[in-house]
Amino acid sequence: MWSKYCIPFFGDYAVSDAKDLEEAMLLIQNGYMIDPKTGREGNYDILMDGDKITGIGKNLPCPGQNCEVIKGEGLLVAPGLVDVHVHFREPGFVDKEDIMTGAAAAAKGGYTTVVMMANTNPRIDTEEVLRQVLDRGKETGIHVLSCANVTKGMKGRELTPMKELAAAGAVGFTDDGVPLMDEKIVRGAMVAAAALDMPVSFHEENPELIDNNGINRGRASEHYGMGGSPREAEIDLIQRDLELALETGACINIQHISTKEGVELVRRARKRGPNIHAEATPHHFTLTEEAAIRYGTLAKMNPPLREEADRLEIIRGLADGTIDIIATDHAPHTGEEKGKPITEAPSGIIGLETALALGITRLVDGGYLTMGQLLRLMSTNPAAMYHLDAGYLEEGGPADVILVDPAAEWIPGEYASKASNTPFTGWKLKGRVVRTICGGKTVWAD
């Protein structure tokens, strides 16, 4: 199926033909294309020249000798996925992950655009640090973007220079990792972000209501003999921030929603204002607190896995448009960290390499979503919220394209990420990315 130019761009996998490929055009022949932005579907050829799509049609010729032909029969052709919630840990925590290995995991999972969270060390709260991570991202071959912190040092007391950070390249703002408790600060951040026409993404857990986070207060917390995180911790801050967003007109994103009550609050708010968004993670639409009992620290995360009724309501929210984004919250940790007792181990799992397959396996094959709906949640919608030129397939659009074998079954176990902290190792999943193209260049091929 493939030409000789199967060139992951990372580390020892680069081959001597890379320079030639950079100059080549790519022609995908007769793949089943889905453009989630327009709903256009069918068997088409796609021609890419440089970083743009220059043709979509039937029986397109491959102009010139320097044109690589990719046979697309039996494969799904879709826009590169967009993840607006990843932790690449650089600077400061590169033993867990760095921007290069995080980007490798993204490319392997079909992502061509990612948005980093800002809880690094130092924090991404100055123009200097922001430019450093963005410059590093340009070395990866995919589009690595970043939010900036809402407050200086993530201390929740003083707003960062949001206008200056936006001018330096931040695509949004976030408090992810340390929820904001001062309502005055939250309102000020929303007013400033609204003036900039930029989104603010909120981690919605009130720490004052939590006794050792990462495990649901219920059957799982009882199993471990700990207090855990009650659903009220999420509900409390979601209520506050939705009202403030409707008051200020700010565009906000409720991150990694985990409770049925939170989904319903977002559903009602979206009827009152157009700038309300919410994201769900693959682990929250796949697992419940039973996984925390079975897998231990590998299924410890913030917010925690909750009950079956919550999982089903998250799926209903994805199906009816209440939740309009799927994001991974890719959160690498070392084996040593995850090997600690449940009350001491950090929260979070990796997710970039399994997200699409979990969506296909659980949501599409489960009968909840069409493939087009899944792709919209994983590309078009997150790109639109962050005003990114991504998540669609059109002539003149970006040459960010993935080829997927939707029927292929595979078992996760070898990761491009530095980390392997996930309960999905060893699962049988359906739908495998076989090629990722970013800017007209192959960045991953199976």
Image (spheres, grey):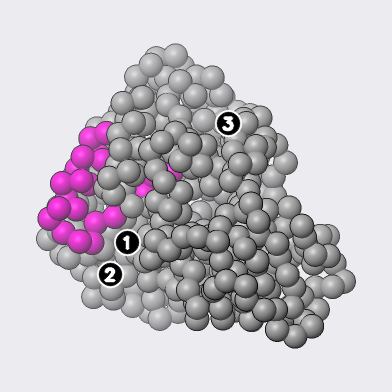
First in sequence: mark 1 vs mark 2 = 2
The furthest residue to the right? 16
* Pick the front one: 233 or 410: 410
Give me the C-alpha separation between circle 2 and circle 3.
Answer: 36 Å
Residue 230 in which image quadrant? top left
Q: Residue at x 37, y 28 (%)?
A: 306
- Secondary element under disc 1, as helix, strand or loop, is strand
> Per the image, is 272 magenta?
yes
- Quadrant in the picture for residue 412: top right
- Mark 2 sits on what residue? 193
Classify residue 379 as left or right of residue 179: right
As rendered, which of 179 and 170 lies closer to the eye? 170
| Mark 3 and mark 1: Cα distance apart in space | 30 Å
Q: Amino acid at mark 3?
A: Pro
Residue under pointer 1: 200
Q: Position of residue 169 (x, y in %)?
A: 45, 76
Say which residue label 3 marks: 423
Please report the bounds of the magenta region as a residue range: 260-283
